[in-house]
Amino acid sequence: MELKVRKFSSTYIIDVNGEMDLYNSYKLKELVLKMIEKKIDKFIINLENVDYIDSSGIGALIFICSHIKKVNMKLQITNIHGSVKKVIELTKLMGYFPISNNIDQAIAKIEQKPMEAQG
Amino acid sequence: MSQVKLLEVNENSKLFDKTGMFFKEFDSDFRQIRYYTLLVVQKAPTEIKEINLLEQQISEIIKNAVKHGNKCDLKKKVKVWYYFSKDKAHLIVEDEGEGFKDLEGWNEFNKKRIECFLNQNFEEMEKYVSYRTSKSDDHDSGNAMFAAVEYWNGGVVFNNKKNCIAVLKTFPKKKKGIDMEDMQ
């Protein structure tokens, strides 16, 4: 698994490439925690290039999502597909995870003003 | 209202019938879990692999045996019986551990989780996204069996000692009629 970070406006997009499994999923947790230390508060985790996820990968996403919700930061998970989507559905986390279809939609959700969010 | 699926304990379940099943035995080497899984899943027809979903679900069962059952003790073995066809996947995994002591606690926990899901109460669900015991460590995600109990639609059954698990998944037949190769 390879992690690459890019920035759009004030949102940081983490592109995950490869398989999120029991041997490497902790790396994503560590990266996000490091970014939070650097005062980053808007995240997109892009799973476009992830074709395999196991419970450790799901666990990493739960950890990140739970942490970010607690400290009132913003997160969207995008481009889930294939068996990754299946595993998230089986674990019944589709409503729990903040999911967007693509990066554009995720950015729109993250960058929207509070007033628009109410509408 | 969908029924909440449970982990069962029933040593006499037909899912423990090993007749005609293949068998492999593995050391409890944590680093080899995905390799062990590949050795098993390679016997499955492509139609039921669903890309890699079957592999992933089998790896979770093997991981539980290696890590939680045998505590990664290389002297302890994990025994795996398996059978695949175009319409079913059947797996039995036995470890040398103490067994899944808190199975009832898990069922209760999962019941509450499903309730939150059905009520779309995701704030409350926060408490139930990860099942943990006093023996859990930071690497335990605590969600593997949530998906397993849904995926293995033919049942998830333990023996009385709860150190042996049998799971079954059936797949719908996609085509009417019989494939000609089956008649040869």
Image (cartoon, rainbow, N blue to C red):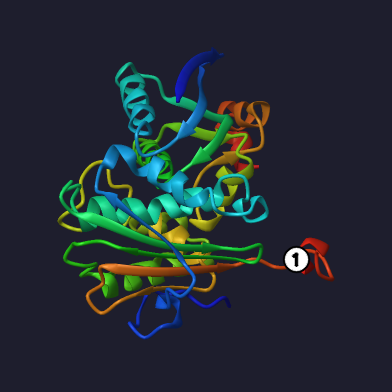
Is the residue B112 above or below the residue A78 in the image?
Answer: below
- Residue A16 located left or right of residue A27: right
Q: Amino acid at mark 1?
A: Asp
What is the x, y in percent for residue B148? 45, 61
Q: Residue at x 66, y 37 (%)?
A: A101
Residue A110 makes an appearance in the image: yes
Q: Is residue B35 above or below residue A5?
A: below
Task: Look at the image and tell me in which quarter the C terminus of chain B lies.
Answer: bottom right
In the foreground, A10 or B82: B82
Question: Residue B152 in the image: x percent, y percent?
Answer: 51, 66
Residue B72 relative to residue B58: left or right: left
The quadrant of the rendering that contains the N terminus of chain B is: bottom right
Residue A82: percent from left, percent from top: 63, 43
Q: Would you place residue A73 above or below residue A95 in this image? A: above
Nearer the observer, A79 or B74: B74
Q: Specify whether A110 is left or right of A33.
A: right
Disc 1 target residue: B182
Residue located 43% across and 44% down the image: A58
Q: Is residue A53 above or below residue B71?
A: above
In the picture, residue B81 is in which quadrant?
Answer: bottom left
Q: Chain of mark 1?
A: B
Give the residue at x 45% y 68%. B167
| Along the line of sight, the residue nearer the viewer: A29 or A44 | A29
- Badge 1 marks a residue whose secondary structure is helix
Quadrant of residue B102 within the rendered picture: bottom left
